[in-house]
Image (cartoon, rainbow, N blue to C red):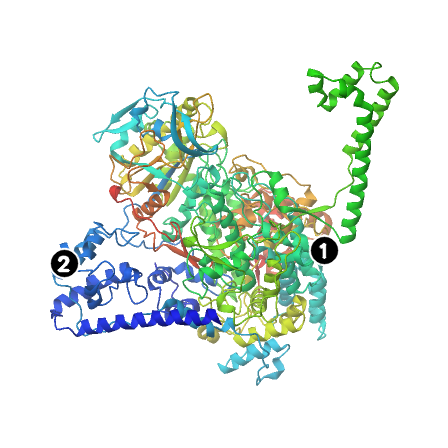
């Protein structure tokens, strides 16, 4: 990652020099840091003399990557694992029984609860015989490509902090999100499009809004761009009414004449040239982004594969199809939210479990299956890592005296990954007989993060960013093991 | 003394332990059993094995660290092994602990990473080969990292006292305007270099205007300054700018960046912090009033303990309330320590330039700051209540104080006492009147009596038998009187967001092992950090206050002391950075061992000393810098110098800079004539945020109101700082992230900026207003005059004829070729003008 340094720049910055020449200790941590060319710019970002370099210029990974892009299907609100993929046959017939079980959700700590029996039937699918409930008839045909992680745990059972954990690795707000880390580590191959894209549910954003796609303490270049699958795809992409493309071209040409004059005596400040170039890039984006988002270029067959003909599945289907088109064009990290706003507008089934999950499964089942199949038939699944899951799962017991609503559960839940070098057709880890907590092969969100980075060719212990006197990383100072079974 | 001798004793034992260990190693080394290896085997070791040992094992098992008393950086020590015996059995991988550990059979090493199979195979093969290792390699000597760091800290430049330094002698004495110049020139002369020529006057006034107020000068001011060639003209300009109320708005913003000022809590609700804007106003006013920095610092850290009857001192302690707050944390105790960490880290970085946050879980890896130092610093603030527990009421309880002068408070107390006694009196009269009835009440009636609004009906039921009609009407009038009184309590004291403590008795503070609240270690006391104990003044005695421990006051007095080696240095360096684009120390919040060394150490020392000598006056400090020839140099480059010193380490010229996010927005509004500049201070306002951006909120539009146009166009510092919803133009031009202290803003160049500057609602609207004000208010004679005025507004200089002609042609072209009407064509030119590089860059 040191190759792209501007040749005019004479060697190391003062800070690098000090560190290289200074104390020889901690060399392991430091070498990761020094391998990072952006870091040197950061320390002198405000000096106006360091040559400009796009922070998103492509960079070499640490080792050969299996995946080049990630599509994270974020099931906001927390889908119930025992109603989707984590089959609990022992619970059949137990509905309504009060059992001793430790739970911790928004309703606090409890030691007892009334069982809500899983509401959907489970069957084995694929050659590998993975369990899937009736909620996902389409997805069940893809299980041989999927590795299910059934022993996930997280640090918080509360949406706000748990979402920050899933997206940025910490329960405290202020850290960069996974997509920011990936773009920081790898840059993007297509500067005409953003490197980190988020698509939201039309019902609203997730809790904490933009904190979920923020670049935290990294520069704004690494934050996500929100893209819409209908209308203008990106904020401020379309010139205002009355400004034709030709008129805007004239404006930019004239602007450049002024800027060239201004720059003539200030050529040493490469930011000025960069700013001129950025206007051209923006101009190009105005045509390349609508092209990327123009789903009418897709065949009827493809559109139907993603469920664009279905009333419930059309929105998420459009977003999944758009995600494939973006990945095809070199976008590194795409995150799509299933569910938004509050209450039953997302997977947060506190009230009627069946209504809630039937709705959200119907919205996403066909689009997700379509995405996996489409990626596969185009040979893209090999290098596109698809991740599915929410910020936590749900409890085996009822939240209230009546009804089927389940409270949050961060002690055990299911996520899955497919493509991007993941060995599909298997399940890793288990929860107890009620699915109340992870038992075998406990996995933490940090393991998931480390594994995602690994598939992209990034060593999570070396992808660091020097901030506040510390080498910060997505996974944190304590590190985390990769999920070896699936890679 | 006792403590000292004890620790010396321990150190001796420790050292002797090492000695004996080294002796054993040497004996083993000399043992004849060491086999001879082939060059090929040694090559295998060097290229395959040693790199693995180095990258995967030496962090814990080498001369630096000996976990389990095991070292893997010498063959003899590997054979000797550690607590669990020999690490390898040469020739027998199956019997080698090292091999079983990396295979994760028994021990699991390295602990956080499973070695790939290839690496395990390499290590196995190496053991099979009897562990080849160069025979003549000496055993590296044990290194005590902590002692090494402490030793470095002893001599570290930033920990030495701030002393008086003489200004250096220079050859070109004519260039010296303030003593600052002598230091700069001295280093240039040492390199046989000379400073750049002075900047053009138009460049200089634009530079200093933005620098001191964040706003452009008017073209009239520029012209007057260009023509006023009196030598004192510039100093007078500097005085005017320092006296401007907009100075506080610009420089207060720097401070707000440092203390991560925001007006909401983040997380699910991201609710507004009550009265937080008073802190922002306090900061702006403090700069405008040239409040001495030591006082400014003390008010924020302990205003409540040092001057409880000064409203500003209470508002200043809002400092403790600016951070993020998770109102439903998964682990309350951890959340408390997370909040404390936020305060400890911010306080140590901002005021002292030390990164204490790194020592929360373990001793600092790069600085002589121990974990004990961290918790000791925390103990000064240990009694500070958490921002709230969950609800708004709990925030009121923990973080809202009534403020007033002693007089106001006494007056209020008296009024409240009178009010209460009036109420008590009425209550008594009422109970006397109703007593006969109350005594008779039974069953449901008795139950109902509890509800005040049912009482009259009950009384009527017993009237006139038990209560006379006269008494009944008396009751009615008295109770109406009471209700009126209850509904109109005397106006309360003003409120502020402020610090509150658990009381005067300090809660105990413990070192938390690995930062875990469930694993308390040794108890700590509020003492000075170990690295500064011999290098800073004593703490003043800690005197408990009525409601707090008095510890923060002692901390504040210590940090604000003129004897403290860091406080003044850190501050003058920040001020230098904001004026010159980078600090004398480039890492402004890290003056520790891993921070950057000062490029001009003597100058930094001189400035710090001079600053303290002049009563910590910021305006004095500004004058020292602004009036220097160094500040007034041109930013133009000189090729031979650029080759020699590309980073301008020596300050041979001034550095160009881009406008900050706030300056970009405020300047756009100024150009269009919309900026509401006269209104200062007050509650925050809501800028326009497009629906597409609000759609990212879980409840679109929540917590974002609509301000009147004149409020909406106020300066950016007054925009409501909502953590999860940042005004797009500010976000894209690198406004400070609101969650952590920001000592240096990023300066990115990215397409989002260009898109926003060309297409956003804001720019479209402002370009339209810009055009309208040109056409309707300026009433130019022709397009040349119009273009000239437009360019003057954005560039604050007289444009050239070529520039004017180009603009006229463009307006013409828009009308003839692009079918725009005249106002629209002018609007397009205004948009162009707002996109000029020169508009957002200063020379």
Residue B310 disc label: 1
Q: Is residue A248 visible?
A: yes
Query: Are the residues flagged by discs 1 and 2 from a single subunit?
Result: yes
Q: Nearer the viewer, residue B579 or B44?
A: B44
Residue B125 disc label: 2
Residue B198, horizontal then vertical, whole percent? 60, 73
The 10 Å Cα crowd at callout 2, few under 14, some 14 to 19, many 20 or more, is some
Q: Residue at x 63, y 51 (%)?
A: B717
Spatial CA distance of label 1 from label 2 is 75 Å
The answer to whether residue B599 is above or below residue A197 is below
Say which chain tag 1 marks.
B
Q: Quadrant of residue A34?
A: bottom left
Residue B562, horizontal then vertical, whole percent? 61, 70
Say which chain tag 2 marks.
B
The answer to whether residue A71 is above or below residue B75 is above
Q: Nearer the viewer, residue A469 or A100?
A: A100
Mark 1 vs mark 2: in front: 1
The answer to whether residue B439 is above or below residue A297 is above
Residue A74, horizontal then vertical, whole percent? 40, 36
Q: Nearer the viewer, residue A274 or B336?
A: B336
Question: Residue B309 vs residue A198: left or right?
Answer: right
């Amino acid at each position: 990652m040191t190759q792209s340094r501007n040749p005019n720049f004479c060697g190391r910055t003062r800070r690098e020099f000090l560190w290289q020449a200074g104390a020889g200790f901690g060399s392991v941590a430091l070498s990761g840091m020094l391998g990072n060319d952006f870091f040197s710019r950061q320390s002198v970002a405000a000096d106006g003399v360091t040559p400009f370099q796009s922070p998103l210029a492509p960079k070499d990974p640490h080792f050969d990557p299996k995946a080049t892009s990630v599509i994270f299907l974020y099931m906001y609100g927390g889908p119930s694992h025992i109603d989707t993929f984590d089959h609990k046959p022992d619970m059949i017939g137990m509905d309504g029984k009060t059992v001793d079980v430790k739970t911790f959700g928004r309703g606090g700590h409890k030691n007892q609860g009334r069982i809500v029996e899983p509401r959907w039937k489970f069957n084995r699918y694929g050659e590998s015989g993975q369990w899937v409930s009736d909620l996902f008839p389409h997805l069940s045909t893809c299980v041989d490509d999927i590795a299910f992680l059934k022993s996930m745990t997280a640090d918080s059972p509360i949406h706000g902090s748990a979402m920050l954990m899933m997206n940025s690795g910490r329960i405290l707000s202020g850290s960069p999100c996974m997509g920011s880390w990936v773009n920081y580590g790898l840059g993007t191959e297509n500067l005409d499009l953003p490197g980190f894209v988020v698509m939201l549910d039309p019902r609203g954003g997730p809790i904490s809004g933009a904190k979920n796609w923020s670049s935290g303490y990294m520069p704004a270049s690494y934050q996500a761009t929100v893209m819409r699958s209908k209308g203008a795809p990106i904020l401020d992409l379309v010139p205002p009414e009355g400004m034709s493309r030709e008129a805007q071209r004239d404006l930019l040409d004239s602007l450049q004449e002024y800027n060239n004059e201004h720059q003539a005596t200030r050529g040493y400040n490469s930011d000025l040239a960069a700013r001129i170039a950025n206007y051209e890039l923006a101009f190009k984006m105005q045509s390349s982004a609508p092209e990327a988002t123009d789903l009418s270029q897709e065949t009827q067959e493809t559109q139907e594969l993603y469920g664009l003909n279905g009333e419930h599945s059309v929105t998420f289907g459009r977003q999944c199809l758009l995600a494939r088109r973006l990945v095809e064009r070199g976008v590194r990290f795409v995150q799509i939210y299933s569910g938004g706003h509050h209450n039953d507008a997302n997977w947060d089934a506190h009230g009627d479990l069946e209504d809630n999950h039937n709705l959200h499964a119907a919205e996403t089942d066909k689009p997700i299956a379509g995405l996996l199949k489409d990626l596969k038939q185009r040979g893209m699944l090999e290098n596109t890592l698809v991740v599915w899951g929410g910020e936590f799962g749900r409890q085996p017991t009822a939240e209230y005296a009546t009804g089927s609503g389940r409270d949050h559960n961060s002690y055990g839940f299911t996520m899955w990954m497919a493509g991007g070098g993941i060995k599909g057709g298997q399940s890793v880890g288990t929860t107890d007989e009620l699915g109340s907590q992870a038992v075998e092969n406990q996995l933490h969100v940090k393991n998931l993060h480390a594994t995602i980075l690994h598939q992209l060719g990034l060593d999570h212990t070396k992808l660091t960013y020097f901030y506040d006197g510390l080498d910060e990383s997505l996974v944190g100072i304590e590190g985390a093991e990769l999920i070896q079974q699936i890679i | 003394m006792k403590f000292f001798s004890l620790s010396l004793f321990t150190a001796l034992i420790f050292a002797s332990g090492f000695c004996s260990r080294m002796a054993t190693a040497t004996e083993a080394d000399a043992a004849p059993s060491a086999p001879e290896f082939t060059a090929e085997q040694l090559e295998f070791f060097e290229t395959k094995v040693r790199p693995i040992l180095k990258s995967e094992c030496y962090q814990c098992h080498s001369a630096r660290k000996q976990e389990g008393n095991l070292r893997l950086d010498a063959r003899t020590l590997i054979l000797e092994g550690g607590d669990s015996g020999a690490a390898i059995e040469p020739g027998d991988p199956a019997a080698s602990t090292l091999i079983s550990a990396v295979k994760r059979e028994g021990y699991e090493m390295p602990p956080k990473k499973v070695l790939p199979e290839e690496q395990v195979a390499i290590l196995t093969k190496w053991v099979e080969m009897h562990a080849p290792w160069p025979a003549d390699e000496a055993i590296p000597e044990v290194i005590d990292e902590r002692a090494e760091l402490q030793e470095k800290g002893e001599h570290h430049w930033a920990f030495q006292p701030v002393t008086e330094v003489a200004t250096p002698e220079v050859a070109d004495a004519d260039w010296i305007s303030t003593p600052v110049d002598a230091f700069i020139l001295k280093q240039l002369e040492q390199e046989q270099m000379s400073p750049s020529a002075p900047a053009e006057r138009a460049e200089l006034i634009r530079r200093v205007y933005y620098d001191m107020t964040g706003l452009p000068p008017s073209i009239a001011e520029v012209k007057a300054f260009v023509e006023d060639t009196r030598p004192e003209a510039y100093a007078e300009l500097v005085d005017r700018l320092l006296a401007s109320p907009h100075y506080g708005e610009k420089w207060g913003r720097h401070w707000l960046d440092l203390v991560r000022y925001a007006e909401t809590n983040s997380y699910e609700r991201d609710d507004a912090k009550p009265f937080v804007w008073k802190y922002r106003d306090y900061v702006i006013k403090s700069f405008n009033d040239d409040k001495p920095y030591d006082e400014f610092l003390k008010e924020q850290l302990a205003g409540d303990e040092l001057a409880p009857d000064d409203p500003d001192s209470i508002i200043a302690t809002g400092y403790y309330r600016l951070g993020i707050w998770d109102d439903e944390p998964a682990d309350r105790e951890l959340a408390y320590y997370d909040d404390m960490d936020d305060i400890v880290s911010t306080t140590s970085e901002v005021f002292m330039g030390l990164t204490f946050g790194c020592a929360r879980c373990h001793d600092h890896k790069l600085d002589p700051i121990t974990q004990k130092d961290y918790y000791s610093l925390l103990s000064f603030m240990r009694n500070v209540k958490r921002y709230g527990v969950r609800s708004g009421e709990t925030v009121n309880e923990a973080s809202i104080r009534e403020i007033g002068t002693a007089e106001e408070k006494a007056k209020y107390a008296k009024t409240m006492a009178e009010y209460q006694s009036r109420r008590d009196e009425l209550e008594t009269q009422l109970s006397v009147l109703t007593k006969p009835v109350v005594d008779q009440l039974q069953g449901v009636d008795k139950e109902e009596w509890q509800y005040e609004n049912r009482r009259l009906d009950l009384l009527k039921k017993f009237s006139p038998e038990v209560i006379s009609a006269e008494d009944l009407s008396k009751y009615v009038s008295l109770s109406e009187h009471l209700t009126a009184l209850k509904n109109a309590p005397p106006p309360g004291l003003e409120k502020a967001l402020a610090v509150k403590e658990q009381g005067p008795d300090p809660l105990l503070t413990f070192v938390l092992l690995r930062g875990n609240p469930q694993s308390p270690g040794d108890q700590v006391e509020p003492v000075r950090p170990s690295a500064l104990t011999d290098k800073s003044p004593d703490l003043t005695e800690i005197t408990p206050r009525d409601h707090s421990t008095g510890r923060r006051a002692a901390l504040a007095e210590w940090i604000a002391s003129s004897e403290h080696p860091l406080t003044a240095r850190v501050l003058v360096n920040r001020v230098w950075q904001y004026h010159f684009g980078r600090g004398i120390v480039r890492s402004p919040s890290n003056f520790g061992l891993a921070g950057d060394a000062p490029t001009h150490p003597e100058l930094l020392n001189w400035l710090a000393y001079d600053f303290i000598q002049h009563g910590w006056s910021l305006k004095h400090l500004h004058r020292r810098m602004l009036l220097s020839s160094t500040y007034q140099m041109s930013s133009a480059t000189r090729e031979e110098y650029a080759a020699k010193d590309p980073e301008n380490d020596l300050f041979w010229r001034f550095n160009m800079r881009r406008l900050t996010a706030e300056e970009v927005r405020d300047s756009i509004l100024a150009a269009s004539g919309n900026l509401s500049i006269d209104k200062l201070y007050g509650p925050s306002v809501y800028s326009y945020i497009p629906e597409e951006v609000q759609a990212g909120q879980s409840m679109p539009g929540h917590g974002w109101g609509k301000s009147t146009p004149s409020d909406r166009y106020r300066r950016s510092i007054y925009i409501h700082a909502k953590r999860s919803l940042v005004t797009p133009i500010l976000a894209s031009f690198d406004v400070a992230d609101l969650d952590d202290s920001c000592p240096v803003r990023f300066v990115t160049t990215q397409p989002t900026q260009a898109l926003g500057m060309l297409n956003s609602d804001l720019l479209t609207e402002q370009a339209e207003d810009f055009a309208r004000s040109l056409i309707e208010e300026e009433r130019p004679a022709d397009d040349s005059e119009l273009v000239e005025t437009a360019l003057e507004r954005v560039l604050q200089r007289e444009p050239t004829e070529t520039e004017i002609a180009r603009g006229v042609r463009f307006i013409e072209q828009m009308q003839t070729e692009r079918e725009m009407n005249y106002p629209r064509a002018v609007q397009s030119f205004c948009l162009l003008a707002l996109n000029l590089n020169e508009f957002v860059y200063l020379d």
